[in-house]
Amino acid sequence: MNRLLIKNGRIVDPANKIDGLFDVYCVDGKIVEIIPPNPPLEKGGASGDFKVIDATGLFVFPGFIDMHTHLREPGYEYKETIKTGTMAAAAGGFTSIACMANTNPVNDNSSVTDYILKKAKEEGIVNVFPVGAISKGLRGETLAEIGELKDAGCVAISDDGRPVLNSNLMRLAMEYSKLFNLPIISHCEDLSLALDGVMNEGFIATKLGLKGIPNAVEDIIVARDIALSELTGAKLHIAHISTKGAIELVRNAKQRGLNVTAEAAPHHFTLTDEAVTGYNTNAKMNPPLRSPEDVKALKNGLKDGAIDAIATDHAPQNIDEKDVEFDKAANGIIGLETAFSLSLRLVDEEVVSLNALVEKLSANPAKILGLHTKGSLKAGNDADITIVDLNKEWVVDASKLKSKSKNTPFGGWKMKGKVIKTIVGGRVVYEG
Amino acid sequence: MKIKRKDILGIEDLAKDEIELILSTAESFKEVSEREIKKVPTLRGRTIINLFYEASTRTRTSFEIAAKRMSADAVNISVSSSSVVKGETLRDTAKNLEAMNPDCIVIRHFSSGAPHILSKLVKCPVINAGDGTHEHPSQALLDMLTVKEKFGRIEGLKVAIIGDILHSRVARSNIYGFTKLGAEVRVAGLPTMMPYGIENMGCRVFYNMEDAIKDADVIMMLRIQLERQNAGLFPTVREYSRLFGLDAKKLERAKKDVVILHPGPVNRGIEISSDVADGKYSLILDQVKNGVAVRMALFYLLLGGSRE
């Protein structure tokens, strides 16, 4: 019997409407009880065979869920593996991650899904939920076998990394996905407008002489996909939302009662395109870092609920793919290990409450992905728990991060809020 | 005299007094090129590498002649873009060149920011000879020298830069340079070739060429890349030329003592008509002549001529 007791922590569990000092009892990987602290427990009695974690002065949250990660395995093991990616996730307080389909081979059939899940079981230290491809080979031409992907364990479908440019194919994917109740995660980018842009279109791009990507690149496809969601009734989730216009479109869609959700990445609400100055390739990602006005809109969207979830878009890239001319550099940054501390700044800035932040990192992604036994600490749920010291300060040392790749723009940043323990299925998988 | 910086990566980084120092140093070097023996021993034993990733005749030759007239050993490396695709990275090239202990590297590259990467990897000075659509500082310096020689000053002049501002590193460097020296800079071109927020660099934006050149002291015509038509930025060369080409008729609107610059190579009959390019207002060949002097000055100031 695996028995775990987390004592005296401040539990914040928005989905369960709990915020206070409680003890959490876990047995065999499940949460069995949350009760007010019981001092006599320390002396024998029922607590005798529980392994005790003293969380005095610490916060205890439902394990964080990152619904947007690139684990790079199979195919790009030199960037990240399921082993190193899940280690990075654990270090960042994530107990579950959804991994995107743009591996090699693409996760567009059950054998790849099986491989990912098998590797995750053998080598992974947090829960891994594969996202299947919408189209075969991510080519945007014909649908992948979505039913088979669902049966194999995929929790959503997405061609992430690429948009589905053909509107009819997107419509068909939405209609078809309803059969399996899978959300469609849309990477919204009008490639015919983005052309060979490499950063946000704005004065910084003008100064640096870099080709810009206007906001309309995202807005156009978000508008299209909302229209298609309205047409089909499918569950649409907008990945890595970055523009003011797109947020307004999602807000409006929600007001109209459509089944549309959205996620934002910490780098998009923390940095602006100014970070590219000096041709910093660790500030190159897609969608690009946007203007201060967009950052403000992201914060407003997080505040009023237009944006449901915080997701990292953790995108490991090898140094050789980043240490090159800016226009040749690969897109993306790693995000799992800095996401929580960066997000906590939103609480300090009074953009969101701590409860709302935890919700966007746990309950909401669980709900969107249909992970019914996760995202909350209620009895019967999986014992996936993140214990955090909100006041502990630390400095990001890229070389010490668990991820196999070190492509972060946050190296040297002073952070507040540190993950102390990450617990998956009642077992401690990370201690900070 | 030595300039207190390692590299010349862009005019944006230069202070007004640094620009003035470069221009006055260049003026003093002009005389070398007039001699029968066009050589001074200043940089004897120094090695200058011209690393060109983009085709260039004028700029590469100008840097090479400048190096040779300073008695430096100039080595030219032309890397065609096809060999870059399968060849080594800029980082590896930089490290290999560094191992040969050069005293200065001049780089032209099709990627904006490439000289910045290089400068972090090598100990010697790096001169940006044009990077992508970012900057072309030596071009702007020779343009400023040419204008200064003609008018005796730059402050208070009106400079109109006409053409494809979006893709022009020459425009960016000149906007910074002329603005820093107190000129009023105007840019004019098609809205499809005007970069976002360019007015934040301190210039005025015009979409009508006649308005831009009216009462201008200097008209700088930019080369139009003909492949921009394929990208749809303008419908035809003919229409472009009608709207933004400089010919004798449009020139009637300009001041009587206006001067005309062009960084070359010239598309005759497209952005500038032959009679104007070869006419009395044109300083195009003065620019080329001054280019050598400016590059000699840059070598001198960066490499510190006194180390004999």
Image (tube, coloured by chain):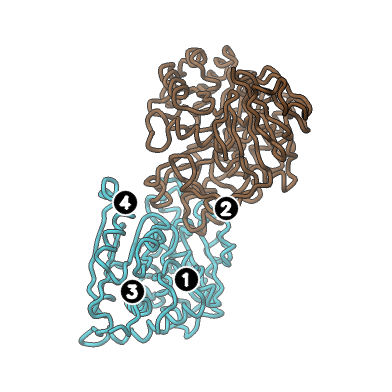
Chain colours: A brown, B cyan
Which disc number belongs to residue A413? 2
- Is B287 displayed left or right of A168 in the figure? left
Look at mark 4 in the image and give the residue it sits on: B89
Q: Dots 1 and 4: beta carbons under 8 Å?
A: no
User: Please, what secondary structure does the residue beneath circle 2 have?
Assistant: loop
Q: Earlier in the sequence, mark 1 or mark 4?
A: 4
Q: Amino acid at mark 4?
A: Thr
Name the residue: 41% across, 47% down: A322
Look at mark 1 in the image and give the residue it sits on: B219
Q: Is residue A12 above or below residue A109?
A: below
Q: Amino acid at mark 2?
A: Trp
Q: Amino acid at mark 1?
A: Ile
Tell me the distance, in whole angstroms, between the alpha carbons under discs 2 and 4: 29 Å
Tell me the distance, in whole angstroms, between the alpha carbons under discs 1 and 4: 39 Å
Q: Amino acid at mark 3?
A: Val
Look at mark 3 in the image and give the residue it sits on: B288
- Badge 4 sits on which subunit? B
Q: Are marks 3 and 2 on the same chain?
A: no
The crowd level at tag 4 (other Cα within 10 Å; few <14, some 14-19, many 20+) is some
Q: Is residue B82 above or below residue B56?
A: above
Q: Dots 3 and 2: beta carbons under 8 Å?
A: no
The crowd level at tag 2 (other Cα within 10 Å; few <14, some 14-19, many 20+) is some
Can I make out residue A230 in this image? Answer: no
| In front of the other: A187 or A80 | A80
- Is B244 displayed left or right of A256 in the figure? left
Name the residue: 38% across, 76% down: B283
Closer to viewer: mark 3 or mark 4: 4
